Image (cartoon, rainbow, N blue to C red):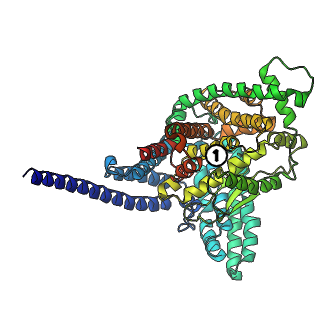
Amino acid sequence: MKKTIASVALALVLFSCNEKENASANIDKSFDNYKDYFVNELWKLNPDWAANQGFHNYDSILIIPDANSKTRQLDFSKTQLDSLKNYSLEKLSDNNKTDFYMIKNLLEGFAFSINEVKASEWDPSRYNVGGSFAEILNGNYDSLEDRLSNFNLKMDNIPPYYEAAKKNIKNPTVEHTNLAIAQNLGGISVFENELKVAVEKSKLSPTEKEEILAKAKTSVKAIQDFASWLQKLENKTPRSFRLGQELYAKKFDFDIQSGYNAEQIYQKAVAQKKELHDKMFTLADKLWEKYLGREPKPTDKLALIKQVIDKISLQHTTPEKFQSEIEKQIPELTAYVKEKDLLYIDPSKPLVVRKEPDYMAGVAGASISAPGPYDKNANTYYNVGSLSGWSKEDSESYLREYNDYILQILNIHEAIPGHYTQLVYANQSPSIIKAILGNGAMIEGWAVYTEKMMLESGYKNSDEMWLMYYKWNLRTVCNTILDNSVHTRNMSKEEALHLLTQEAFQQNAEAEGKWKRATLSQVQLCSYFTGYSEIYDFREELKKKQGKDFKLKQFHEKFLSYGSAPVKYIKELMLKEEQ
């Protein structure tokens, strides 16, 4: 009798467990279907973002940034947030919980940007069609003729696009106005030189060729008129480029999605700066005689570090060889990662080093343009800023900053095993949400993490390389201090340049560029140090926990398998698997 009761009880428990598993599976399946619907609706509202991710169904559409488009975005946000309420978080799988949080953050971020930040009013550089049209011309998807057909249709909305932009702009910042003028005028080459070459190569009929080139002239005029309108705009009370403490703190939470808040990561950066100065002094003091002989040492530690760095920085390439030097180092880094078995690098995903396109110029000197999850086999571009037209003094300053040691660290960060490698992994993620809603702090944090990881593994091990790495890492730390101080602490340009040149040992050209970047962006400069700190600290935590069972390659590949999700969620999922 007891056996029978026990058997019945066990059967009921198993039945109950199966019922719960089936219910969870059904909810996850329903949520997966919802995600597909959500993404397609997202792309309808944001066709340029869709194209950037490799989804080209809406390439012929250029959204006019008028009041109707703003209303549609807000309605979309509200409707989708209501839809999320249909799914119980506790019943979703761990991976879907992360997707839930990322979707929710995006939707709330839309409303925050439109209703509170209101950058559409004060940032004219948001209005620039050059990039999305260039992507159509440069793409490897579809036939050239099909892409040109979409290009042609998309041009129809360029004149009303810029007319709507003019109506939106109210008291813009001086800095964003100047950037908008420069980038829009730079993007004209897409509609003149690049389009002309593509049309000549195509199999379009003479009539079709004539039509598209005529429409391009109309488009160029609209762009020129917008730039001219900005140049003549009477703007007696321009908005400050500073975001302010309240908006900055909120934007940090939405953009970074960290376990830290803005003030916590700022304080952590201030402490880290001191630690790096101590490490750098030890190395610089050791290298003094090698580079400065019997010259008397300064009593000020920072002055001593600066003099040694200045001597080492004289080892650099030439303006003419800057891009070719980068190209040469990529296969060397690939070979090293393979030799040390740090992580798998897919040889079938091409990386192309190119001169930075004109429509991208003005913010960063080096960047990666990666294909999205729908276009996984397309080229990844390593965009390198050109030194053409620079004065001899500015070129020398820039090249001392990107000297023979730091150029290698830059390539680790941007290419292998940094951005390029991480974004290839992100495209393999089974979750489309984690691939397309990439978290900037995770993406930048990974790139910064790989710099130290490579040196820890023995890459080009020398006192000089470590000193230059610390200088480079100090830049990451000071990015956070600079950005927070500029937008919430009223830091002046003079104070910023002192921080960057005297405390972070940067060249004047680099410091001037970073000041400009801090005035044109908000929060993004914090993503490097925040993401790096979270990844590195998590790795060390896992090493202690796993002991001799810890495998670096296994950690890297597992970490990257979750796509570009916020580090706090990746950490949560990986630790759960440990249980």
Residue farthest toward the bottom in the current orientation of the protein: 205
State the image quarter where residue 202 is shown: bottom right
Residue 402 horizontal/vertical position (percent): 80, 43
Question: Residue at label 1?
Answer: 447
Residue 71 horizontal/vertical position (percent): 45, 52
Between 44 and 23, the one nearer to me in the picture = 23
Between 218 and 512, the one nearer to me in the picture = 512
Residue 180 seen in the current view? no
Residue farthest toward the left in the current orientation of the protein: 1
Q: State left or right for residue 129 relative to residue 76.
A: right
Please determine whether, in this image, residue 576 is positioned above or below residue 380.
Answer: above
Between 78 and 386, the one nearer to me in the picture = 386
- Identified at 82% across, 56% down, the residue is 324
Residue 172 seen in the current view? yes
Question: Amino acid type of disc 1?
Answer: Ala
Residue farthest toward the right in the current orientation of the protein: 294
**The C terminus, quarter of image:** top left
State the image quarter where residue 222 is shown: bottom right
Please determine whether, in this image, residue 432 is positioned above or below residue 245.
Answer: below
Please determine whether, in this image, residue 140 is positioned above or below residue 429.
Answer: below
Q: State left or right for residue 431 relative to residue 472.
A: left
Please determine whether, in this image, residue 397 is positioned above or below residue 565.
Answer: above
- Identified at 55% across, 55% down, the residue is 426
- Identified at 42% across, 44% down, the residue is 576
Residue 479 horizontal/vertical position (percent): 66, 35
Q: What element carries label 1?
A: helix
Residue 277 horizontal/vertical position (percent): 72, 26
